[in-house]
Image (cartoon, grey):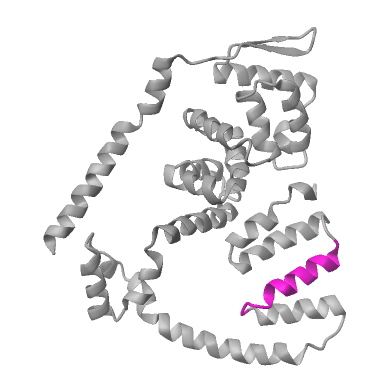
Amino acid sequence: MANYDLTPRIAPNLDRHLVFPLLEFLQERQLYADEDILKAKIELLNNTNMVDYAMDIHKSLYHTDDVPQDMVERRVEVVGRLKALEEAATPLVSFLQNPNAVQELRADKQYNLQMLNERYQIGPEQIESFATPLNQVQSRIWLMHWSLFIFFNHDNGRTQIIDLFNQDKYLNAIQTNAPHLLRYLATSFIVNKRRRPQFKDFIKVIQQEQYSHEDPITEFLACIYVNYDFDAAQKKMKECEERVLAEKLNLNYDEAERWIVNLIRTSKLDAKIDSELGTVIMEPNHPNVYEQLIDHTKALSGRTYKLVSQLLEHSQGQTAR
């Protein structure tokens, strides 16, 4: 089961304090030795300001009430630094907490920089670091990782995660730097019947990534919808039993047959079940050239409108200067 642990992939995209719930989960599931988990927690805390927590873990790990002197000195340093940072961030925090002030922002970048500097004492160095395309992509990746804690603990989370992750700019970020997030998006699609129209496009992403990223859940979907290999899908189903789909896919024979029938019906696949042989007979569906053309151009109108709007907005900003 540890082979499919995504913690090493997810942790670099999280704030350190968000990694602790993951370590707690691994400790509860006993995937690793308790001593290794405690050492990982201390190592994770070394470069953070959570000195008090580090002291508590040190006491638990070494069964002592004493802590190293460097931790005591570190705590004094942290308290002083936090006070300094709080004072430095006060102008920006006060601005963001003021709805009337935020409404003063315009599409004109130069106007915003000048206004923020003159009226709110917020300098360009506090803003420019977030403006590059690379930082925007990284910010989206961080947001998606952080949002997992919310989406999978919310009643409507599996619908909301599809609405966010399946947007072009977020899906591009996933394919570029975080393909492991496809596991969570795939899980949400499988257990969610409200987003079936988007599922077809997501399968194309699975098809594109099936040779560059290995995961039992995405491979399960690829076996059914791309390769039409139900024997391989059954093997992947067993692997998924150890993952988040266990409750959905751990079926007996009759339940599995009903599940596959519903899958064929809702997906409009050209297939039928031979109950005597226990097999699925499937005819691959090859779209003709007209269907492929329509499929590739169906979003062209919306993207063109968006591009024109951005160009007009940019030209208006240039004129205002």
The quarter of the picture where residue 240 lies is top right
In the rendered view, tell whether residue 82 sits above or below residue 40. below
Residue at 69% in and 57% down:
8
The reply to whether residue 252 is visible in this rendering is yes
Q: Quadrant of the C terminus?
A: bottom left
The quarter of the picture where residue 23 lies is bottom right
Residue situated in front as seen by the camera: 301 or 191:
301
Residue situated in front as seen by the camera: 311 or 82:
311
Q: Position of residue 271 (x, y in %)?
A: 63, 11
In the rendered view, tell whether residue 244 sits above or below residue 269. below
User: The magenta stretch spans which residues?
Assistant: 33-49
Q: Mostly what secondary structure, the magenta segment?
A: helix
Q: Is residue 114 magenta?
A: no
Q: Is residue 35 magenta?
A: yes
In the rendered view, tell whether residue 92 sits above or below residue 66. above
Q: Position of residue 278 (x, y in %)?
A: 78, 13
Q: Position of residue 172 (x, y in %)?
A: 47, 45
Residue at 40% in and 69% down:
129
Residue situated in front as seen by the camera: 105 or 210:
210
The reply to whether residue 192 is visible in this rendering is no
In the rendered view, tell whether residue 274 sits above or below residue 22. above
Residue at 86% in and 79% down:
62
| 256 with respect to 265 (left or right) | right
| 26 with respect to 90 (left or right) | right
| 255 with respect to 191 (left or right) | right
The quarter of the picture where residue 232 lies is top right
| 209 with respect to 275 (left or right) | left
